[in-house]
Amino acid sequence: MSSIHHRGPARVQASLTPMIDVVFLLVVFFVAVSQLVDRERLELDLPQPTPSAAHQPEEGGRAVVNVLPGPEGTSLGYQVDGRMFAVDSAGQSELIDHLRQRLQSTPGLFINVRADKQTGWGWVAPVMSAARHAATLAGDSAARVRLSVDSGGR
């Protein structure tokens, strides 16, 4: 004979053991990972920029070099202080000499290079090279050159 035991209505209970195991494994994982990250970080004494990059330098004297636009992106010459300089090697040496004299007479001189938007870079680069060379001849450590583009619409 078989006997059936009546225990009453069945009650559903959730077992918390698997959830506690998963949480414990996650805690161990994150603790281990955080220690690995801390070991790879180096303590560096980084320099502080003085003056900061956003600081505007004091406005000094300036020489404006106009790259005169020519046909099809070329240049007809350079104009500084009302003087014209040719684009050939003789004009370049005269431009260097003129900029050297300006740099020697005006400490902190900025050289502003203006060019039309159609003028090719190959006509602007010699002016920057001339400014660098003139600064070297004038005993300045570096030329302070600013580039601007004239859009043609005034």
Image: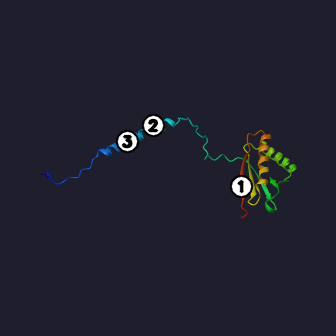
Residue 148: numbered disc: 1
Residues under labels 3 and 2: Cα distance? 16 Å
38, 43: nearer the viewer: 38
Residue 19: numbered disc: none
- In which quadrant will I find the C terminus? bottom right
- 3 or 1: mark nearer the eye: 3
Q: Is residue 34 left or right of residue 102?
A: left
**Residue count near mark 2 (Cα–Cα under 10 Å), binned few <14, some 14–19, many ≥20:** few
Q: Is residue 34 left or right of residue 118?
A: left
As drawn, which residue projects farthest toward the right?
90
Residue at (41, 41) in percent of width and height: 29
Q: How many marks?
A: 3
Q: Position of residue 98 (x, y in %)?
A: 82, 47
- 3 or 2: mark nearer the eye: 3
> Which amino acid is tagged 1?
Ser
Q: Which residue is under mark 3?
A: 25
Residue at (77, 42) in percent of width and height: 135
Per the image, label 2 sits on a secondary structure element best described as helix
Q: Which residue is under mark 2?
A: 35
42, 45: nearer the viewer: 42
Q: Are marks 1 and 2 in contact (CB under 8 Å)?
A: no
Q: Position of residue 97 (x, y in %)?
A: 83, 45
> Which amino acid is tagged 2?
Gln
- Is residue 39 positioned above or below 57 on the image? above
Per the image, label 1 sits on a secondary structure element best described as strand
Q: Earlier in the sequence, mark 3 or mark 2?
A: 3
